[in-house]
Amino acid sequence: MTSEPTPRRSVLLAGAGSVAALAATGCGSDSDSGGAATPTPTTARPTSPETSASPTGLPTGPTSASPPVPGELARTSEIPVGGGKVFADRKVVVTQPEAGEFKAFSAICTHQGCTVNKVADGTIDCPCHGSKYRIADGSVAAGPAPRPLPAEQITVSGNSITLDG
């Protein structure tokens, strides 16, 4: 008795159907808000983490593999706790002073208008004249900057961060 090999196309199609069935089990939301999240001034916390499903159908935890959200600035996983990330093209810096707490500030230094270039050791740093700002509130940690960085409005929904306005 000889068995005939299964054509590769049949195997691929069967596998794709299984993946689609698994993906459908992880697309729901525990939130019943029925709409977009309300923007929170300068601080945003995730409204409901997205989860993925294991082959058993049980949630496995947060995932960054979900499709991008229109207008998305970043994923929450891209912003380190106790640090942040500069988005020079959007002239904004997003920080996460504590786990799950996201803040946004202008990336334009209040000293002479240079763009800040990094977030390190709890500060947002300007390369031009050495000004440093605290990641928690944008206040001046080291001059010559005369004023804090202005706050920007962001919305965190699931694992997506969007810049308002």
Image: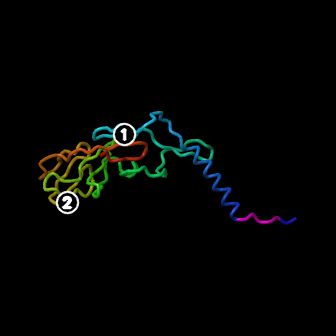
90 left or right, relative to 24: left
Helix, strand or loop at mark 2: loop
Helix, strand or loop at mark 1: loop
Q: Which residue is mark 2?
A: 127
What's the magenta region?
A: 3-7
Label 2 crowd bin: few (<14), some (14–19), many (20+), radius 10 Å: few
Q: In which quadrant will I find the N terminus?
A: bottom right
**Is residue 4 on the magenta stretch?**
yes
* x then y, percent, for residue 45: 36, 39
128 left or right, relative to 90: left
* x then y, percent, for residue 55: 62, 47
| Magenta span dominant secondary structure | loop
Extreme residue toward the top, this view:
32
* x then y, percent, for residue 24: 58, 45
* x then y, percent, for residue 147: 14, 46
**Label 1 to label 2: alpha-carbon separation:** 30 Å
Q: Which residue is mark 1?
A: 45
